[in-house]
Amino acid sequence: MKLKPLADRVVVKLMESEETTKSGIILASTAKEKPQVAEVMAVGPGGNVEGKDIVMYVKVGDHVITSKYSGTEIKLDGEELTIVRQNDILAVVE
């Protein structure tokens, strides 16, 4: 099943964070922070949202940094995805 986000929304898949610290300490899954780097899986069309013209600056395949507690988490076909608004994306990783 494919998702087609509406308006200024973007579907991202969070990338796994490292499980060991620089000093070699292995972190339990409960001690790890939510990753902020994600891969863009789908992008909405943008357009006029709440009276403002929105241009979409990200594209499928981009790696982005999202706000820490933003978006709506969903599970689709066994994959955990997050739907965020474009303004919750802080930067594109190049």
Image (spheres, helix red, strand yellow):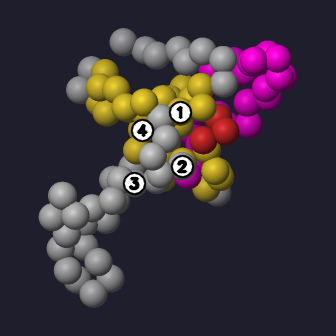
- The correct choice, above or below, for 75 with respect to 32 in the image is above
Q: Earlier in the sequence, mark 3 or mark 1?
A: 3
Identify residue for label 4.
13
Marker disc for residue 72: none
* Residue 71 rendering spot, x and y as whole percentages: 47, 35
- The correct choice, above or below, for 57 with respect to 53 in the image is below
Q: Look at 18% across and 58% down and name the residue there.
A: 29
Mark whose residue sits in front, 2 or 3? 2
Secondary structure found at label 1 = strand
81 horizontally vs 63: left or right: left
Count neighbours of disc 3 (C-alpha within 10 A) and say few if under 14, some if 14 to 19, many if 20 or more.
some
The answer to whether marks 1 and 2 mark residues whose Cβ atoms lie closer than 8 Å is: yes
Count neighbours of disc 1 (C-alpha within 10 A) and say few if under 14, some if 14 to 19, many if 20 or more.
many
Mark 3 to mark 4 CA distance (whole Å): 10 Å
Q: Amino acid at mark 1?
A: Val
Q: Amino acid at mark 2?
A: Ser
Marker disc for residue 67: 2
**Is 48 covered by the magenta stretch?**
yes
Q: Earlier in the sequence, mark 3 or mark 4?
A: 4
* Residue 90 rendering spot, x and y as whole percentages: 64, 50
Q: Residue furthest bottom?
A: 23
Q: Earlier in the sequence, mark 1 or mark 2?
A: 2
Span highlighted in magenta in the image:
43-65
63 horizontally vs 79: left or right: right
Q: Quadrant of the N terminus?
A: top left
Q: Earlier in the sequence, mark 2 or mark 3?
A: 3
Which quadrant would residue 6 be assigned to in this image? top right
Secondary structure found at label 4 = strand
Give the camera-side residue of 94 and 34: 34
Q: Earlier in the sequence, mark 4 or mark 1?
A: 4
Identify residue for label 1.
84
